[in-house]
Image (cartoon, grey):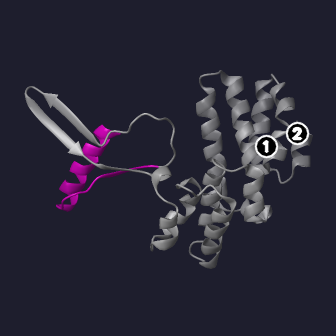
Amino acid sequence: MPKRMRAYAALAEEKYNLPTYPILVNILKESDVEIPTSYESQFAGLQARQDYRVINLWEVDVEIAFTQPVPSLLPFVPILKGGAEESTVQRALQILRADEQLSQLEIVMAFFATFVLDSALVQQIMRWDMAVLRESPWYQQILREGEQRGEERGRQEGRQEEIVSGIELALEIKFGAEGLQLMPEISQISDLDRLKAIQQGIKNLNTLNEFRQII
């Protein structure tokens, strides 16, 4: 990423003929490794350096989302510093739902909330009409993201575990803790074609009873 920041800054300056102020925004904390704030290279006695500002959302005080005129920060409230509280998420939700142009962003906020709060609690806070929710393009994107995360996690563990991981994540996003109760049964399935069918079937099911029928 640091190397790319140098390239992006140069391309932007060339395209718009204006000075640039590169910023790297990190959404979720994955490790305690210090994140560099510059990129330097040296070749044949020549040196190049690109500084950029680093913003880690987990270090940004959640009150900024409520006091500054930047509504695009509201979906990130759960992962901001001090934002992983039920009352804080509800506060952000009320603001999003009060503005028709922002209402679709509540699903994005729910997605980030699942990283810091129990999925069942997130569903309770949102009080979602699941039938309406499934029609949202944001919801479909979240399911695709879940599948991708499951696939990435599973490449190191083999094809079977890859599919099972994808099923687990999709169940958690769609049905919360109740859906995860079915994982012990699913984990016993060794037929890859059957696991693939189950993974694909989650997208089109409305209830856990329907899901139980396909397993």
x and y percentages locating residue 84 in the rendered image: 62, 55
Using the image, determine if residue 79 lies above or below residue 64: above
**Image location (x, y in percent) of residue 154:** 63, 28
Q: Which mark is residue 201?
A: 1
Is residue 12 highlighted in magenta?
yes
Residue closest to the eye, 64 or 157? 64
User: Cβ–Cβ below 8 Å for labels 1 and 2?
Assistant: yes
Magenta stretch, residue numbers: 1-26
Amino acid of disc 1: Gly
Q: Quadrant of residue 191?
A: top right
Q: Residue at x 92, y 41 (%)?
A: 213
Q: Is residue 118 left or right of residue 207?
A: left
**63 to the left or right of 157:** left
Residue carrying label 2: 214
x 67%, y 24%: residue = 159
Quadrant for residue 86, please give it.
bottom right
Q: Position of residue 173 (x, y in %)?
A: 72, 48
